């Protein structure tokens, strides 16, 4: 800045340049080189990839994110575009739609998480119906379109916030079924005990026969 330029004029010039760069961003896909360079300079901003097949909603969401001082690094209209851009841009947060052609949000999330387990993916779905499937696929949060946008902002800015997986949500299907085998074992043991009590004349010889067969097999080996 020259000595003839005032601080206010310098701020105005900088703002004008940033607005021009923002207006030149691609609607779908990656940012152009100038926009990416400007984005890289804003290292304090969270970098967000927006995935939604609705062009209107995607534009509205991107505008809102930028007003909240977040950096939209790219936009995707399909799950396949989301996979490509996630690899190229490595965003801090992916905002994921569910109902998309060819590849759903759940399937896209599952593919991203398989390769990048620590990727942060927050769903913005049209309905509650996919919440459980989204979390099973590895989603870190679930937001329904039309809900309070401040809750979405909390999910984006605070990884441990209210939009994390509900308390007690298991980390895997194995965790959800850890009680199943003890239950089955208990039922089998109870059935055997009741069988000996009710039908001793049948079960005792049968048990002896099974024991003899096992001993014979072990002896042959």
Image (tube, rainbow, N blue to C red):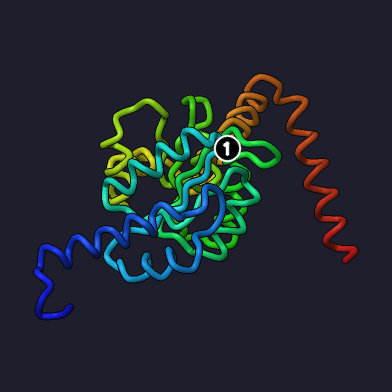
Q: Is residue 186 above or below residue 174?
A: above
190, 171: nearer the viewer: 171
Residue for point 59% across, 38% down: 185
Residue for point 17% across, 63% down: 11
Q: Which residue is mark 1?
A: 53
Residue extending furthest toward the right: 220
Residue for point 36% across, 67% down: 38
Q: Quadrant of the N terminus?
A: bottom left
Q: Is residue 192 above or below residue 18?
A: above
Q: Position of residue 100 (x, y in %)?
A: 62, 36
Which element carries disc 1, helix, strand or loop? loop
86, 175: nearer the viewer: 86
Q: Quadrant of the C terminus?
A: bottom right
Number of residues whose C-alpha sits closer than 10 Å to that of mark 1, classed few (under 14), some (14–19) or many (20 or more): many
119, 196: nearer the viewer: 119
Residue for point 81% across, 55% down: 215
Q: Position of residue 178 (x, y in %)?
A: 52, 43
Q: Position of residue 206 (x, y in %)?
A: 80, 34
């Amino acid at each position: 800045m020259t000595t003839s330029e005032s601080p206010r004029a310098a701020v105005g010039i900088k703002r004008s340049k940033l607005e021009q760069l923002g207006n030149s961003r691609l609607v779908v896909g990656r940012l152009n080189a100038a926009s990416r360079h400007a984005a890289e300079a804003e290292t304090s901003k969270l970098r967000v990839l927006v995935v939604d097949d609705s062009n209107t909603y995607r534009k509205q969401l991107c505008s809102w994110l930028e007003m909240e001082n977040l950096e939209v690094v790219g936009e995707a209209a399909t799950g396949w575009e989301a996979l490509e851009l996630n690899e190229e841009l490595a965003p801090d947060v992916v905002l994921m739609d569910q109902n998309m052609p060819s590849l759903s949000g759940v399937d896209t999330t599952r593919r991203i998480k398989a390769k990048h387990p620590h990727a942060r993916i927050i769903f913005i779905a049209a309905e509650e119906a996919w919440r459980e499937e989204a979390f099973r696929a590895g989603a870190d949060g679930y937001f329904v379109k039309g809900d309070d946008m401040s809750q979405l902002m909390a999910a984006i800015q605070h990884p441990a916030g209210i939009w994390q997986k509900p308390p007690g949500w298991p980390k895997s299907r194995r965790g959800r079924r850890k009680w199943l085998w003890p239950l089955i074992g208990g039922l089998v043991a109870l059935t055997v005990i009741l069988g000996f009590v009710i039908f001793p004349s049948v079960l005792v010889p049968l048990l002896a026969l099974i024991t003899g067969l096992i001993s014979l097999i072990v002896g042959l080996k």
